[in-house]
Amino acid sequence: MQTTPNVKLTINVPADLHLMIKTHAVLTGSTMRDYILNLVTNSMKQNKAKLPNKETMKALKAAKSGKTNLYKNVNELFNKLDKMKK
């Protein structure tokens, strides 16, 4: 797998869910970070989620920076990708 820089992801969760995640992480000998990353990675594998190819990554970066003639913004790109899946 290609190594990329880490970025910070912040989400708000209910306090009781936070406590459950923290408890499960401790019981498995993991940090909350590692526990959540493991859950997300396993879920993506089970759902056969695929990483975008080079062409898609290039389009995403261009759309995000506004340097594309194909899409007005990232949302338009994702909407087109969603329609292609149907």
Image: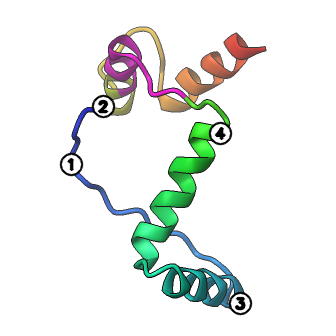
Res. 16 mark: 3
Q: Which residue matches tag 1?
A: 5
**Which of the two discs, 2 and 3, sits closer to the camera?**
3
- Residue 21 left/right relative to 34: right
In this rendered view, identify the residue nearer to me: 60 or 55. 55
Instruction: Report the amino acid beneath label 2.
Output: Ser
Is the residue marked by circle 3 packed among few (<14), some (14-19), or many (20+) residues within 10 Å? few
**Residue 75 at what x, y percent from top left?**
56, 31
The magenta segment is 50-60
Using the numbered discs, state the Cα–Cα distance from disc 2 to disc 1 in whole angstroms. Answer: 18 Å
Q: Is residue 61 above or below residue 21?
A: above
Rendered image quadrant of residue 45? top right
Figure quadrant of the N terminus: top left
Magenta: main secondary structure equals helix
Residue farthest right in this picture: 86
Q: Give the amino acid at mark 1.
A: Pro
User: What type is the residue that disc 4 sits on?
Assistant: Gln
* Residue at point 39%, 25% (across, down): 60
Any magenta on residue 28?
Answer: no
* Mark 1 and mark 3: Cα distance apart in space: 31 Å
Q: Which residue is mark 4?
A: 46
Residue 20 occupies quadrant:
bottom right
User: In front of the other: label 4 or label 2?
Assistant: 4
Please, what is the three-letter code of the amino acid marked with disc 3?
Asp
- Residue depicted at x 41% and y 71%: 33
Looking at the image, tell me whether mark 2 or mark 3 is earlier in sequence order: 3
Please identify the residue farthest to the front as the structure is shown.
28
